[in-house]
Amino acid sequence: MNGLMTCLLVLALNLSPEELLKKVDDVIVPKDDYSFTMRFRVQEEGAGEREFEIKVYVKGEKRLIRFTYPPQVKGMAILSLGHDVMYVYMPGYKKVRRIASHVRNQTFLGTDFTYEDISIPTYGNDYNPIDAGEEGDFYFLTLKPKEEGKKDYGKLRLFVDKETFVVRKIEYYDRNEKLIKVETRGNFKRAKNSWIVGEVKMENMINGRVQMGKTSESEVEPLPDDLFTTSALLRGESK
């Protein structure tokens, strides 16, 4: 019965799960280089509210994320080069270290974002599409890891804009397929041939913690290749 329902949904969608995933990944990897600044507010019951700010540089599958606020983390940077290659720079130690595979699923700065969440270039590298269909104003796409045990997530469910194919919501499930957190994205800005997210919200479904990010400025222009190097991390360079 489930197989029949999946076939009917795919026919209604007129796209196979594989085709929908390719369209999603094509949008994630931008046609243009761009950068943006985003400030996050973290709300946790009994712990008040705190903020941090990042400057993000994007070139193809490459991501450079620099922390600019608060002072305690200013100068910290994460470099993702795609294909499971990630580095972190800690200014206090003045060292760059590669982020091992088992560490990429760890959260940072007391948030529910993992290193992988904020740097993933494409889903097709690590996930297989299981089914796809329509739900309200969105297409949905269910993904499962290609290699069991390699990912902390047992399943992802993406909700995709029908016109632009940008991901508007992600449901994260653990290995027992229990929903653990939900990320929503909105207020996208069209910048030449790319889409820049304007707002992000992450909700922890276990402890109720909420993180909200808002883009304050963005710019589309060519970025130099040497910005996305470990040498640039050490020098603390930005464009």
Image: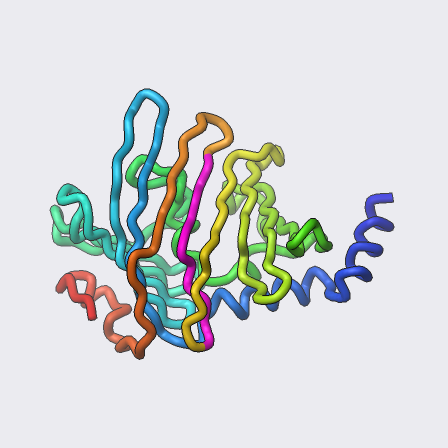
Q: Which residues are magenta?
A: 193-203
Residue 83, percent across and down? Answer: 44, 63
Residue 214 in sight here:
yes
- Left or right, residue 8 beside residue 96: right
Tell me where residue 229 sits by quadrant.
bottom left
As for residue 196 lying within the magenta part, the answer is: yes
The quarter of the picture where the C terminus appears is bottom left
User: Which colour scheme appears in the figure?
Assistant: rainbow
Residue 97 in sight here:
no
Q: Residue at x 26, y 58 (%)?
A: 55
Q: Residue at x 28, y 27 (%)?
A: 48
Q: Above or below — where is 137 with respect to 108?
A: below
Q: Nearer the viewer, residue 120 or 175?
A: 120
- Left or right, residue 156 beside residue 7: left
Q: Residue at x 24, y 71 (%)?
A: 227
- Left or right, residue 229 beside residue 135: left
Q: Above or below — where is 121 with respect to 204?
A: below
Residue 175, percent across and down? Answer: 58, 37
Q: Residue furthest top?
A: 46
Residue 116, percent across and down? Answer: 42, 51
Q: Residue at x 64, y 54 (%)?
A: 138
